Image: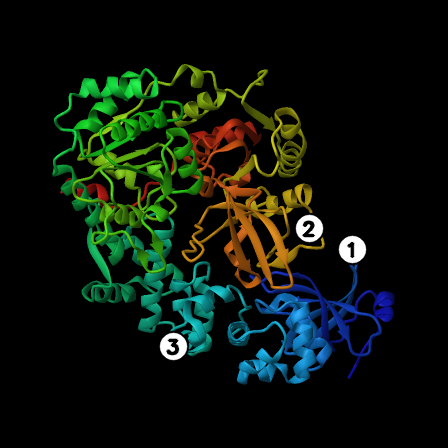
């Protein structure tokens, strides 16, 4: 076996001869579980001191045996490294390595002290004990039967993940999204993927069709096979849904699938016709063109339309009340004087069982709801208040004095759907849904399904904000249909008129560039930055120094950077890394997982709905503790503490910077928004308007005036939907 010393590598700079290195992992300096890229400190055979190995491994643990093929390089910044073009890991064989391996947080519930006791009792037989005779672990002090079974289950999951990673690696794909694949398919993942690799692109968010296609080609699936053509059509339709559409024109679907699959359109049309005949997708008119819809979304839009029309026909509980008396009573209850449009909205709420109230910032939507809530209570009726996000629900509760929940919590979300439905409806006479522009088709269908027949529904929101992240444009379609009564609140209240944030938001919404000239004691600022590097530097100074010092705000809790997109130097990925280094640098308690570094004090966001933990996509919290002994991270979401195992940290991302889409429904004391030309593809009027209206006390735009002008002028692309037509039918 050919080996070169680190000294030789230093002298020569780089050796081109391929070498082989074997050793055990001493420390994981960095590991990105999405890409597999890792930097390891390895106790290598033939080397007195640990060496640095750089390569790719889907999974890796401290103490594991590493075999690597590659070459020594002398990196200008990091010194001597072994750059591995081939790197494999396997279970350690010595007692010392096994103890470090098991105690590294690999298995939930097994920390360093527990691993030490296990090795002391079983030595190198411990893996066999865990796999075949886990009950014998109860002989070890502190381990009961439940703990022993949990350790065995965690080990089985770990082995399954290793097998999936090896399978993907054998087909030229690094172990991306391993946990999601395992959660979706379980231990039978390899069999399911082998039978139809295209399911990866359809079932696993973030798994690209091209990668599934790569596996399929290696499994000898023909380029023109029916399974591939069906998958290509399904993938295009699924991507359209991710972009907010509920369907696509048939010719557009075939055109995009033809480009994706590199096959003629004529070969795809018979396959699409067969899918329609089989009921897998639904054909129907789409703005005068033949359209194709996902079956579930088509049915949901039809159900929403019919249910809203049925609800509107019912008898209103307040039908006998005088509308003028109701307005006066509400004004007395909360000691305000309503504007003309607010009075109109309140009177409409007494007549219409289904009502939409919309309007921009500062027009008194929340004040209207507060008066209505007090009015309902005084007439011995029950009201339920909800909003799509936790922050919006909390703000609604604080402003009205009545309890409010997220939509998911109100409907009692579970893994299989919602416990509240037509058979177990909500117990309320009036349901108020705030921030209704965020409702997608599926969530709106769940709301109206759970609403009792005798209840009224009030949708409150700003229709000019971004539509939902999910498919559809529910609030806009309901308003445009003309079927449901709509009241637009127009008058901006005096104290709000004095806010430059409100003035800027209304200007942007009207297609006008807001006044960005500096003014003393303002709540809206524009900081010029012509280059990306300059913008990044100024954002850092604003968040760390200038805003906290001038306005007395906490840089982590109170200031939120909002980005048009994730990628790019002014995207969330780059800015989160920069801001973490400035505000809460990683320390000895930090842990590398899922491409991020997490430590106590870090600001994080949940990125998928977790019904078991009752924490939902978009909720922001603060890391309180990293416990290496049990392999867990504790995160505080407001007054709730949620615990994650190290393997579940792919549910979190850093949240010093988040996208404007993710910030919908939330409000922050201070907001900083980068506005640059490199974001032009995403930065449009509604996006900018939504971002500006997230700031309650301070908004700072950082970038170029030309990019700002371009953003204000650019309108959103329309979404394909049939809800408006269904309502008008």
The span from disc 3 to disc 1 (Cα, nearest Å) is 46 Å
Label 2 SS: loop
Q: Quadrant of the C terminus?
A: top left
Q: 603 or 727, which is in the foreground?
A: 603
Residue at coordinates 35% horizontally, 53% vertically from top-left? 413
Residue 580 picture location, percent across and down: 64, 45
Residue 709 picture location, percent across and down: 49, 28
Residue 419 picture location, percent across and down: 29, 55
The span from disc 1 to disc 2 (Cα, nearest Å) is 20 Å
Q: 723 or 49, which is in the foreground?
A: 49
Seen in the image, is 307 located left or right of residue 338? left
As displayed, is residue 334 above or below residue 626? Answer: above
Q: CB atoms at circles 3 and 2 under 8 Å apart?
A: no
Using the rendered image of the protein, determine whether residue 216 is visible from the camera's viewpoint: yes
Q: Quadrant of the N terminus?
A: bottom right
As displayed, is residue 185 above or below residue 420? Answer: below
Using the rendered image of the protein, determine whether residue 67 is visible from the camera's viewpoint: no
Label 1 SS: loop
Q: 16 or 633, which is in the foreground?
A: 633
As displayed, is residue 64 above or below residue 697? Answer: below
Q: What mark, if any, has residue 195 been given in the picture?
A: 3
Residue bearing the label numbered 2: 586
Residue 298 picture location, percent across and down: 23, 53
Residue bearing the label numbered 1: 77
- For marks 1 and 2 on the same chain, the one whose residue lies earlier in the sequence: 1
- For marks 3 and 1 on the same chain, the one whose residue lies earlier in the sequence: 1
Q: Which mark is in front, 3 or 2?
A: 2
Residue at coordinates 71% horizontally, 80% vertically from top-left? 95
Residue at coordinates 20% horizontally, 54% vertically from top-left? 423
């Amino acid at each position: 076996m050919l080996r070169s010393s680190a000294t030789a590598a230093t002298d020569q700079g780089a050796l081109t001869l391929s070498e082989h290195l074997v050793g055990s992992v001493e420390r994981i300096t960095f590991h990105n579980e999405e890409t597999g890229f890792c930097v390891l400190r390895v106790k290598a055979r033939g080397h007195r001191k640990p060496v640095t190995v750089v390569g790719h491994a889907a999974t890796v643990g401290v103490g594991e045996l590493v075999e690597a093929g590659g070459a020594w390089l002398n990196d200008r910044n990091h010194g001597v490294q072994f750059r591995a073009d081939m790197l494999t890991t396997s279970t350690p064989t010595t007692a010392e390595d096994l103890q470090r391996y098991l105690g590294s947080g690999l298995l939930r519930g097994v920390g360093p002290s527990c691993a030490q006791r296990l090795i002391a009792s079983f030595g190198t037989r411990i893996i066999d004990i865990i796999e075949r005779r886990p009950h014998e672990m109860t002989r070890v002090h502190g381990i009961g039967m439940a703990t022993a079974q949990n350790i065995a289950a965690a080990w089985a999951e770990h082995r399954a993940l290793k097998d999936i990673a090896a399978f993907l690696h054998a087909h030229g794909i690094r172990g991306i999204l391993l946990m999601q694949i395992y959660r979706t398919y379980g231990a039978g993942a390899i069999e399911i993927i082998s039978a139809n690799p295209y399911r990866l692109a359809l079932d696993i968010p973030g798994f690209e069709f091209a990668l599934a296609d790569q596996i399929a080609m290696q499994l000898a699936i023909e380029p023109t096979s029916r399974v591939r053509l069906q998958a290509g059509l399904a993938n295009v339709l699924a991507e359209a849904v991710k972009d907010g559409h509920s369907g696509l024109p048939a010719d557009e679907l075939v055109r995009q699938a033809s480009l994706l699959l590199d096959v003629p359109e004529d070969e795809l049309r018979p396959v699409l016709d067969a899918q329609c005949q089989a009921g897998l997708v639904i054909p129907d008119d789409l703005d005068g063109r033949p359209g194709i819809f996902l079956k579930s979304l088509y049915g949901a839009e039809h159900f929403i339309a019919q249910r809203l029309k049925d609800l509107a026909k019912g008898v209103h509980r307040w039908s006998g009340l005088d509308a003028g008396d109701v307005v006066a009573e509400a004004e007395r209850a909360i000691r305000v004087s309503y504007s003309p449009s607010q009075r109109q909205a309140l009177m409409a709420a007494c007549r219409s069982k289904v009502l939409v109230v919309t309007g921009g910032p500062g027009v008194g939507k929340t004040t209207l709801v507060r008066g209505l809530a007090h009015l309902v209570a005084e007439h011995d009726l029950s009201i339920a208040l909800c909003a799509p996000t936790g922050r919006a629900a909390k703000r609604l509760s604080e402003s009205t004095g009545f309890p409010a929940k997220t939509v998911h919590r109100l409907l009692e979300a579970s893994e299989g759907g919602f416990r509240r439905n037509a058979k177990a409806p909500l117990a309320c006479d009036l349901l108020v849904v705030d921030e209704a522009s965020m409702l997608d088709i599926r969530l709106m269908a769940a709301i109206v399904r759970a609403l009792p027949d005798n209840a009224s529904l009030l949708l409150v929101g700003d229709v000019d904000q971004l539509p939902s992240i999910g498919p559809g444009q529910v609030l806009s379609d309901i308003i445009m249909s003309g079927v449901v009564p709509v009241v637009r609140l127009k008058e901006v209240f005096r104290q709000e008129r004095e806010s430059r944030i409100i003035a800027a938001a209304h200007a942007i919404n009207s297609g006008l560039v807001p006044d960005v000239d500096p003014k003393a004691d303002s709540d809206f600022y524009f900081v010029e930055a012509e280059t990306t590097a300059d913008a990044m530097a100024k954002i850092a100074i604003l968040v760390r120094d200038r805003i906290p010092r001038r306005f007395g705000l906490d840089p982590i809790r109170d200031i939120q950077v909002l980005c048009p997109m994730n990628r790019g130097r002014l995207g969330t990925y780059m800015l989160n890394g920069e801001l973490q280094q400035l505000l809460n640098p990683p320390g000895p308690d930090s842990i590398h997982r899922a491409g991020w570094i997490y430590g106590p004090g870090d600001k994080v966001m949940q990125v998928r709905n977790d019904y078991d933990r009752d924490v939902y996509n978009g909720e922001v919290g603060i890391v309180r503790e990293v416990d290496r002994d049990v392999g867990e991270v504790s995160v505080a979401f407001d007054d709730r503490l949620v615990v994650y195992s190290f393997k579940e940290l792919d549910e979190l991302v850093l949240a010093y910077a988040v996208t404007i889409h993710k910030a919908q429904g939330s409000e922050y004391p201070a907001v900083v928004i980068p506005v640059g030309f490199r974001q032009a593809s995403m930065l449009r009027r509604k996006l900018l308007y939504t971002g500006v209206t997230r700031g309650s006390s301070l908004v700072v735009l950082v970038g170029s005036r030309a990019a700002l002008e371009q953003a204000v002028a650019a309108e959103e692309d329309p979404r394909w939907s049939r809800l408006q037509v269904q309502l008008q039918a």
